[in-house]
Image (cartoon, grey):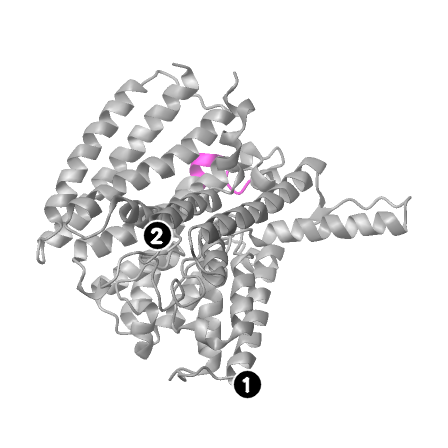
Amino acid sequence: MTQSARTVLFALGALLSALSLAMLAPALVDLGYQGRSAPAFFGSALLGLAVGGIMTLLGRSPEHRLTARGAILLTSGAWAVLAFAAALPLQLSGLDISWTDAIFETTSGLTTTGATVITGLDDLPRGLLLWRSILQWIGGIGIIVTAMAIWPMLGIGGMQLFRLESSEKTEKVLPRAGQIALAIVIIYLSLTFACFLAYVATGMGGFDAVNHAMTTIATGGFSTRDDSIAAFTDGGADLVAAVFMTLAALPFVLYVRAAQGRPDQLLIDSQARIFLGVIAVAAMLLTVMITLSPPPEPDSLPAWRLALVNTISVLTGTGYASSDFWSWGSGAAAMFLLLMFIGGCAGSTSCSIKIFRYQIAASAMRSYVEQLTRPNAVSPPRYRGKALPPETVRSVFVFIFLFFATFVVSATLLSFTGLDTITAISGAATTLANVGPGLGDIIGPAGSFAPLPDTAKWIMTATMLIGRLEVLVVLVMFTPGFWRR
């Protein structure tokens, strides 16, 4: 076994052991109430600790090294292994769901997608509700650390722009990557706690507030109620969600810089400004649409509030729904489909293509047009005022092409399973972009993924992983060259 393979095995074992320890939290919570799912969590935790311990022992080494191929295997393997392990308590708890549904649910949780096959959340054991939220919270912090520590090394889709150990001191937020990770964890915990307090202030119960705080900051969208965040609008919880979804979709490195005395970075960062601009424009357009063409069943909330909350929810990939926006008409449906393909900022818990890639693509196209009109001019693509190397621009365009190619392929495959056009297209979009609810009567905000055939669920499970792991991380493993020495 190579040194890199030992490192991968050791890391996977450690992650599995950590996830198994996390199962004790829902087990203890459930014991305090009805205790229906507690045995399932205790049993799954013991099994996971045993398997994880064996893996760490087999991967022990005096020195751990990780090659690029090992980093890809670790990233992909971690999400797959943890999703399978997390599904075990769902199966053992007595829920009437298949392995397909259980793995779909846990993959949706860890990838912070928020698509669910479980109904009757209001009556679900508290341990299972908490476990779903914990999975999303783990997935949210996990994707930030991965995006900041591993993907820059691999140059995935332009992520090399966010390399932590830059040779330029001005680009170093903190002197070491370990300090970066610690700072991000502290900020993540602080935002979660602040969100919890804000939810409690709206009158939300403590248990609901804990769960929604975790899934809001993770931009995951799992709720403790079938009506999602709409069940708590009387106290203004939907507006709290809008604020913290926005904060969670901003680059976490900006919070580190703000803590170091540069709060102005939150305002002058171009990616953050464009992200906030997209929210403002989309919310205004949707407000006009709702006002001019009210839905068949008018909502008690004002149009601006419905538009703002659901715009932020879909754009950030959270997936909370304060209303059935599928009933708002075809114009609103097209707007939400477009928002799914935009996403939040790099280095955040959000998903999809992300703002910075559109910035780079726009700069590259502008540079190309200028060279056509003025062949002798030197006008390289720029980002944040700096010229971009060709490999960065190339990787961004490759990422965008593969993202949409994966969307087309997955939508086509879903249509072959018997799904109608709207469900197939929006199902492929919402799972690849890790948003959660799709469009239509089946998987829309008022629907569920439970009625879908198993084949469709496995396709969507794959697209959730592909989308969350930035497409290239998964697809590169299917190339013959990846496995050659």
| Viewer-nearest of discs 1 and 2 | 2
Side (left or right) of 243 relative to 227: right
Residue closer to the observer: 318 or 434: 434
- 436 magenta-colored: no
Q: Amino acid at mark 1?
A: Leu
* Number of marks in picture: 2
Q: Residues within 10 Å of mark 2 (few under 14, many from 20)?
A: some
Whether tag 1 and tag 2 are in contact, CB under 8 A, the answer is: no
Residue under the point 18% across and 38% down: 45
Q: Which residue is mark 1?
A: 292
Side (left or right) of 382 relative to 317: right
Q: Which residue is mark 2?
A: 453
- Is residue 474 something one can see in this rendering? yes
Q: Amino acid at mark 2?
A: Pro
How far apart marks 1 and 2 lie (CA) works out to 38 Å
Side (left or right) of 176 relative to 63: right
Q: Is 283 located above or below residue 175 in the figure?
A: below
Q: Position of residue 391 (x, y in %)?
A: 68, 35
Q: Residues within 10 Å of mark 1 (few under 14, many from 20)?
A: few
Q: Which mark is residue 159?
A: none
Q: Position of residue 286 (x, y in %)?
A: 53, 75
Q: Residue 54 is drawn in which quadrant?
A: top left
Q: Over which residues does the magenta segment extend?
A: 172-180
Q: Position of residue 427 (x, y in %)?
A: 45, 56
Residue under the point 37% across and 35% down: 78
**Dividing the image into 4 quarters, which one contains the N terminus?**
top left
Q: Secondary structure at mark 2?
A: loop
Residue closer to the observer: 323 or 462: 462
Q: Position of residue 304 (x, y in %)?
A: 49, 79
Residue under the point 58% across and 54% down: 355
Dot placed on the residue nearer the N-terminal end, 1 or 2 = 1
